[in-house]
Image (cartoon, rainbow, N blue to C red):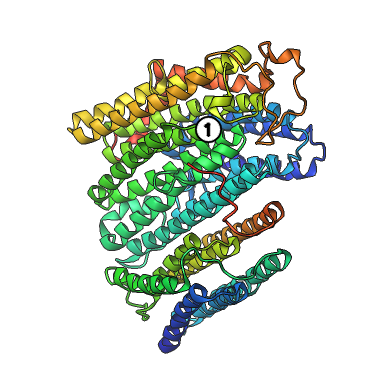
C-alpha cells in the first residue's frame, strides 16, 4: 500500500534535503512537516482499521500498529522540541544531526512493518548506525566515549541477533526446504515442524542480541553512558522509540516460540532477565549522582518490566502494551525537561542542581510530575499498566515474582525520589551556575540579575513535554475503544488478553 | 572439495589464534584480512559443484570487502595515529591463547547438540563459526586498543558469516545485501569514530575512555 511506502521514503527524502540545506538555522524546521506527514498517515491507518501490506515482507499488524503509532507521536513531539533545542545550539553544525534523525525515523518505521526476520535485523542495525551520530552531537570527550561504547556493544548485540536469525532459519528448514524462510506468517503456520534444538539456540541468541539493543541487564552497560551524554532529545528517542522496536523484535520471537510449542522454554528466560534488569536498575539508582544517568537506569527498569510481562503472559501482555505506550510518553517528559534543566544549570550533578521549581517553574513542575508518573503512581498510565501486570502475577500465583516486582519498584521509587526532590526543592545556589565545559552550553549566557528570577521558557522546548504528560495522564484515566481494540488484538498474538 | 573446505576452516581457526597471540597490530590486521579471503573462497566449495553467478558474486564481494577494503581502512587508521603499533591485551598473550583454545573446544561441544542438514558435508563449519564468534568477543573485551576491538568485531562478524553460508540458498538476495551493507556501514562509522578518538585523546586506547562510570 502506498501509505507504507510514504512512511518509509518521506523521511529518507527529508534526510537528503537536510544535507542540501545550508542554513544551520532553518534546517531543523524540515523535521516538523515530515513528522506531521508521518503522524497524519499513521493516524489515518489507525482510524481506517486496515492492515495494509507492501510487497511480500512489509505488513502492518496490530502489534506493529501500536509501536508505529507510539513512535510517530513521539517523533512529532521530538521534532518541535528539536527546533527549539537546535535554535539554542546554533554554534554546532546540525546537518548530520537532522539527517540522522530522519534516517532514524525511516529505519524504525521499517522495523514496525517488517514481518521477515532478516529484514527486521537489517532495519534494527540501521537504527544503531543512525543513532550513533545523534549521540555524538556534543563532540566532546565524554560523548565520544559514550558513542563508542554504544556502537561496539549494540553492534555486538545485533550481530548475535543475526546469528540467532540464522539459527531460526535452520530451525524452520530442518523439516525440508521452505520457499520463503524467515517469513513470520509462514513460521506461525508451520511452527510445529521446527527443529527444537535449533529453535532454542535461536531464541537464546535473539534474546541476548535484541535484549542488548533494548538495554536489558546484563547487556545494559551502554545505556547510562549514552543517555547520560546525549542531548535529552536523543535520550528521549532512544528510550521511547528505539527500545520499543527492540521489544517488538522480542515480541515477534515470542510469537514463533508459541507457534512451535516452546513457550514453556521461553517464558522463564523472559521472567528472569526482566527481574534481573529491574534489580540492576534498583541497585544503581540508589546513590546515583547524575540525574541523566538516573533516567537511563529508569529505562533499564521499564524494559525489564516489559520483558517480565512478556514472560508472564495472559493478562500481563495487555499490561505490557499499555506499559510500552505509557513509558514512552512519561520518559519523554523526563528526558526533555532534564535537557531543559541541564542547559540552564550546565551540570548533570544532582548536588549542583537545586531549586528547579524556583528557577524553571514549568520544567521543574513537569519533571516532578514525570517522576510521579514514571514510578507508577496513580492517576497516570503506568500505574494502570503496572497494576495490570501485578494482577496477572497474583492471579497466576507467581508469588516470588510478585515479591521481587514490588520490592524493586519500591527501591526505585525511593532512589529516584531522593534525587528528584533534592533537585526541585530548595533555593537555587546564590553564586552563578558553574561554567564548566561539561556537556551542552547555551549560545548566550544569562545576565547577572536574570539568574535569580524565574525563567520563562520558550514554548518550543516545553509544549512537547506538556502534551506528553497530558497523554500519559489520559491513558491512566480512560482507555478509549479505538485504542483498547488494537491493544487486545496485539496481545492476542501471543496468547494475551484483557 | 570436502577436503578443501576442511583445510580452509582450519585456516580460519589458525588466523584466530594468530590474532590472539600476535603483538604487532599490522599482523593482526593481515590475519583478519586473510580470514576474510578464506571465507570469501569458502562459498565456491561448500555446496559441491553447484556454482552459479550468485556464488561467484558473493565470493568476489566478500574477498573485496573483508580481504582488501576494510583492511585498507584499518591500515590507514593506524598510520594516521601517533600510536604504538602493538596490541595491548588486558590479559597476557598466553592466557589469551589458552582461553582461545578453550573457546574452540566450547564451539565443538555446543555444535554437537545442533543437527545439521544432510547436504552440509563439513563437520567443521558450525564449530568453526561459533569459535570465531566467541574469540571475536574475547578480543573485544580483553583488548585495550580501539582498533583491536574493531578487529574483534570483524572476527565475530566473520564467524556469523561462516555460519550464514549454510543458508546461502535459503536467504533472499535483498537480505544478503542489507546485511553486508549494514556491516560495512558499521565498520565505517567505527573507523570514523576512531579518527575522532585519536584527535580527542591523542591515542587509540580505551584506557583513556574511563571517565564514565556507574
Identify which residue, A288 or B190, lies in the foreground: A288
Image quadrant in which the N terminus of chain A is located: top right
Horizontal side of A51 relative to A388 (left or right) equals right
Residue A240 seen by the camera: yes
Which residue occupies the extreme left position in the image? A397
The quadrant holding residue A360 is: top right
Could you tell me residue A94's position as x and y percent?
A: 73, 39
Kindly identify the residue that appears in the image at 32 percent across and 68 percent down: A176
| Label 1 environment density (alpha carbons within 10 Å; few <14, some 14–19, many ≥20) | some
Q: How many marks?
A: 1
Identify which residue, B112 or B52, lies in the foreground: B112
The quadrant holding residue B4 is: bottom left
Kindly identify the residue that appears in the image at 36 percent across and 67 percent down: A177
Identify which residue, B50 or B120, lies in the foreground: B120
Which residue occupies the extreme front position in the image? A431
Kindly identify the residue that appears in the image at 44 percent across and 32 percent down: A298
Image quadrant in which the C terminus of chain A is located: top left
Could you tell me residue A379's position as x and y percent?
A: 39, 15
Kindly identify the residue that appears in the image at 41 percent across and 19 percent down: A380
- Say above or below: B56 vs B205: below
Residue B48 seen by the camera: no
Horizontal side of A395 relative to A310 (left or right) equals left
Which chain's residue wears label 1? A
Identify which residue, A287 or B46, lies in the foreground: A287
Horizontal side of A493 relative to A215 (left or right) equals left
Could you tell me residue B90's position as x and y percent?
A: 49, 63
- Say above or below: A406 vs B201: above
At numbered mark 1, what does the secondary structure look like: helix, strand or loop? Answer: loop
The quadrant holding residue A179 is: bottom left
Would you name the residue on which mark 1 appears? A290
- Say above or below: A76 vs B13: above
Amino acid at each position: 500500500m502506498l501509505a507504507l511506502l510514504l512512511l518509509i521514503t518521506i523521511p529518507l527524502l527529508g534526510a537528503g534535503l537536510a544535507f542540501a540545506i545550508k542554513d544551520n538555522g532553518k534546517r531543523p524546521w524540515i523535521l516538523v512537516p515530515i513528522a506531521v506527514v508521518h503522524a497524519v498517515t499513521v493516524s489515518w491507518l489507525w482510524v481506517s482499521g486496515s492492515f495494509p501490506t507492501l510487497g511480500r515482507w512489509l505488513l502492518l499488524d496490530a502489534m506493529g500498529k501500536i509501536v508505529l503509532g507510539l513512535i510517530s507521536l513521539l517523533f512529532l513531539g521530538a521534532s518541535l522540541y528539536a527546533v527549539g533545542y537546535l535554535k539554542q545550539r546554533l554554534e554546532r553544525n546540525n546537518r548530520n544531526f537532522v539527517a540522522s534523525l530522519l534516517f532514524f525515523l525511516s529505519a524504525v518505521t521499517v522495523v514496525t512493518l517488517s514481518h521477515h526476520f532478516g529484514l527486521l535485523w537489517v532495519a534494527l542495525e540501521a537504527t544503531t548506525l543512525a543513532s550513533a551520530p545523534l549521540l555524538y552531537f556534543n563532540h566532546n570527550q565524554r560523548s565520544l566515549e559514550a558513542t563508542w561504547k554504544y556502537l561496539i556493544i549494540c553492534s555486538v548485540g545485533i550481530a548475535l541477533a543475526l546469528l540467532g536469525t540464522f539459527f531460526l532459519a535452520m530451525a524452520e528448514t530442518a523439516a525440508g526446504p521452505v520457499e520463503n524462510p524467515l517469513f513470520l506468517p509462514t513460521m506461525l503456520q508451520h511452527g510445529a515442524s521446527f527443529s527444537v534444538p535449533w529453535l532454542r539456540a535461536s531464541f537464546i541468541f535473539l534474546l541476548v542480541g535484541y535484549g542488548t539493543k533494548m538495554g536489558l541487564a546484563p547487556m545494559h552497560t551502554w545505556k547510562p553512558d549514552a543517555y547520560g551524554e546525549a542531548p535529552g532529545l536523543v535520550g528521549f528517542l532512544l528510550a521511547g522509540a528505539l527500545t520499543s522496536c527492540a521489544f517488538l523484535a522480542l515480541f515477534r520471537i515470542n510469537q514463533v516460540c508459541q507457534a512451535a510449542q516452546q513457550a514453556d522454554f521461553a517464558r522463564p528466560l523472559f521472567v528472569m532477565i526482566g527481574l534481573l534488569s529491574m534489580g540492576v536498575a534498583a541497585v544503581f539508582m540508589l546513590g546515583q549522582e547524575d540525574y541523566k544517568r538516573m533516567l537511563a537506569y529508569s529505562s533499564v527498569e521499564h524494559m525489564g518490566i516489559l520483558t517480565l510481562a512478556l514472560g508472564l503472559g495472559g493478562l500481563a501482555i495487555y499490561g505490557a502494551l499499555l506499559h510500552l505506550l505509557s513509558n514512552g510518553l512519561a520518559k519523554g517528559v523526563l528526558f526533555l525537561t532534564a535537557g531543559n534543566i541541564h542547559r540552564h544549570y550546565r551540570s548533570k550533578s544532582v548536588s549542583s542542581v537545586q531549586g528547579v521549581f524556583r528557577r524553571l517553574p514549568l520544567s521543574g513542575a513537569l519533571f516532578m510530575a514525570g517522576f510521579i508518573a514514571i514510578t507508577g503512581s496513580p492517576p497516570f498510565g503506568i500505574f494502570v499498566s503496572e497494576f495490570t501486570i501485578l494482577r496477572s502475577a497474583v492471579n497466576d500465583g507467581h508469588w516470588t515474582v510478585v515479591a521481587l516486582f514490588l520490592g524493586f519498584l519500591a527501591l526505585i521509587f525511593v532512589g529516584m525520589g531522593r534525587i528528584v526532590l533534592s533537585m526541585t526543592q530548595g533555593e537555587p545556589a546564590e553564586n552563578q551556575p558553574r561554567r564548566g565545559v561539561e556537556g551542552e552550553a547555551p549560545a548566550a549566557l544569562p545576565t547577572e540579575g536574570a539568574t535569580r528570577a524565574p525563567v520563562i521558557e520558550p514554548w518550543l522546548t516545553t509544549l512537547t513535554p506538556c502534551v506528553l504528560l497530558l497523554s500519559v495522564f489520559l491513558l491512566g484515566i480512560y482507555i478509549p475503544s479505538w485504542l483498547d481494540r488494537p491493544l487486545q488484538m496485539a496481545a492476542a498474538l501471543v496468547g494475551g488478553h484483557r | 572439495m570436502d577436503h578443501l573446505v576442511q583445510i580452509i576452516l582450519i585456516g580460519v581457526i589458525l588466523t584466530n589464534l594468530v590474532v590472539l597471540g600476535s603483538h604487532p597490530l599490522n599482523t593482526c590486521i593481515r590475519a583478519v584480512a586473510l580470514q576474510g579471503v578464506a571465507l570469501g573462497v569458502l562459498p565456491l566449495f561448500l555446496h559441491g559443484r553447484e556454482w552459479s553467478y550468485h556464488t561467484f558474486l558473493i565470493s568476489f564481494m566478500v574477498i573485496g570487502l573483508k580481504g582488501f577494503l576494510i583492511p585498507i581502512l584499518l591500515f590507514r587508521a593506524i598510520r594516521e595515529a601517533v600510536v604504538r603499533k602493538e596490541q595491548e591485551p588486558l590479559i597476557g598473550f598466553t592466557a589469551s591463547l589458552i582461553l582461545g583454545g578453550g573457546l574452540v573446544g566450547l564451539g565443538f561441544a555446543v555444535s554437537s547438540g545442533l543437527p545439521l542438514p544432510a547436504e552440509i558435508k563439513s563437520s567443521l563449519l558450525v564449530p568453526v563459526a561459533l569459535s570465531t564468534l566467541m574469540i571475536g568477543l574475547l578480543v573485544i573485551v580483553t583488548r585495550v586498543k580501539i582498533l583491536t576491538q574493531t578487529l574483534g568485531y570483524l572476527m565475530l562478524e566473520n564467524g556469523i558469516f561462516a555460519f550464514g553460508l549454510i543458508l546461502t540458498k535459503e536467504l533472499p538476495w535483498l537480505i544478503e545485501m542489507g546485511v553486508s551493507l549494514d556491516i560495512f556501514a558499521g565498520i565505517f562509522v567505527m573507523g570514523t569514530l576512531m579518527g575522532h578518538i585519536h584527535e580527542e585523546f591523542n591515542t587509540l586506547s580505551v584506557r583513556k575512555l574511563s571517565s564514565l562510570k556507574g
